[in-house]
Amino acid sequence: MILKYINEVRLFQILFEDLDFYNDDVKQTLLSYIDKYIKYKNISSYELKINYESFLKQYSKDAQFYLKNNKYPALSSDYNYPITREEYDIFLLLSTVLTQHRYDIMCEINQSLLGSKSALIIGSGVGLEIELIKESYNFIDAYDIELDKFCYSSHTEVSFYEKEFKSNEIQQYNDIYIVELLEHVSEPYTLIKDAVEVLTSDGRIIITLAVNIPQFDHIINFNDMNLFLKNIDKLGLYVEYEKEIEHKYIMNGLSHSSNIFMVLKKK
């Protein structure tokens, strides 16, 4: 169904055909999951189009605000962008097959898989990362402050917790995923510290950072990588792998990127 919708909406068709889908397995997983979501929610191609275009227009306004004021819009006292969780999830899902950088992030997550006993996902969102990794783990715990019924129905083997993650849990995890989340929280290094406390001695944390991305709900700009590296060093971590994924948005004076890291505990 999603491919049919993409062909019905000219904008989607142009964006989709422009992407370099270099990992066909990831591409098919993404398309299948999006298909499942729009069928579950009974969403039309028109609704997808309106939702996606609205989000893009808002992001353009937010980027202009950031360029003018050197401040993320979400930090402005009079800022308001009403959006439902479903509308947000639609954009997040579609953008994995309509924007190169989000497809690249999904490929990086898929590439990071080693096959371990346990995984923790902090900020599970619409469950897309779970779909990519779930076959590689014996069990997965997932936290988010707001969960959609679609996640429960799509991932019956996952233990979901609809609350903020805290480190006072008994369980230890081989892999921890904090993907596209830290820019949303006021104390990102406290969250990483909590994650370290439930990480096995030889475990890994996969982290993404948003650089110069003034999206409506972003409050932290990770535009100082040296500061990030100093802070994770203080938490007893070191970088095993990192990659900068540039965004291709055309916005004068603004360079966007998503940076992905695999960090491990120091011995």
Image (tube, rainbow, N blue to C red):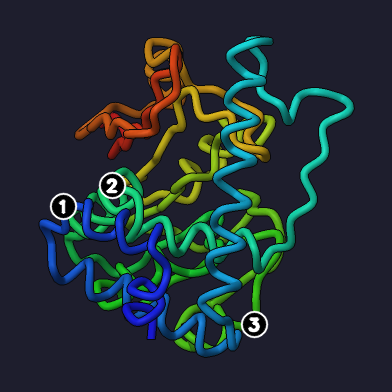
Of marks 3 and 1, which one's residue comes earlier in the chain?
Answer: 1
**Residue on which disc 1 sits:** 20
In the image, taking residue 192 as reference, residue 207 lies left or right, namely left
Determine which quarter of the picture holds residue 265: top left
Mark 2 Cα shell of 10 Å, populated few (<14), some (14-19), many (≥20): many
In the image, taking residue 62 as reference, residue 128 lies left or right, namely left
Of labels 3 and 2, the one closer to you: 2
For badge 3, the amino acid type reads Lys
For badge 1, the amino acid type reads Asp
Q: Are marks 2 and 1 in contact (CB under 8 Å)?
A: yes
Judge by depth and name the residue closer to the eye, 253 or 228: 253
Alpha-carbon distance for marks 2 and 1? Answer: 7 Å
Q: Helix or strand or loop: what does disc 3 sit on?
A: helix
Of marks 2 and 1, which one's residue comes earlier in the chain?
Answer: 1
Q: Which part of the image, by quadrant, shows the C terminus?
A: top left
Vertically, is 158 above or below 104? below
Vertically, is 83 above or below 159? above
**Residue on which disc 3 sits:** 149
Determine which quarter of the picture holds residue 150: bottom right
**Residue on which disc 2 sits:** 100
Q: Are marks 3 and 1 in contact (CB under 8 Å)?
A: no
Mark 3 Cα shell of 10 Å, populated few (<14), some (14-19), many (≥20): few
Q: Residue at x 64, y 82 (%)?
A: 149
Alpha-carbon distance for marks 3 and 2? Answer: 28 Å
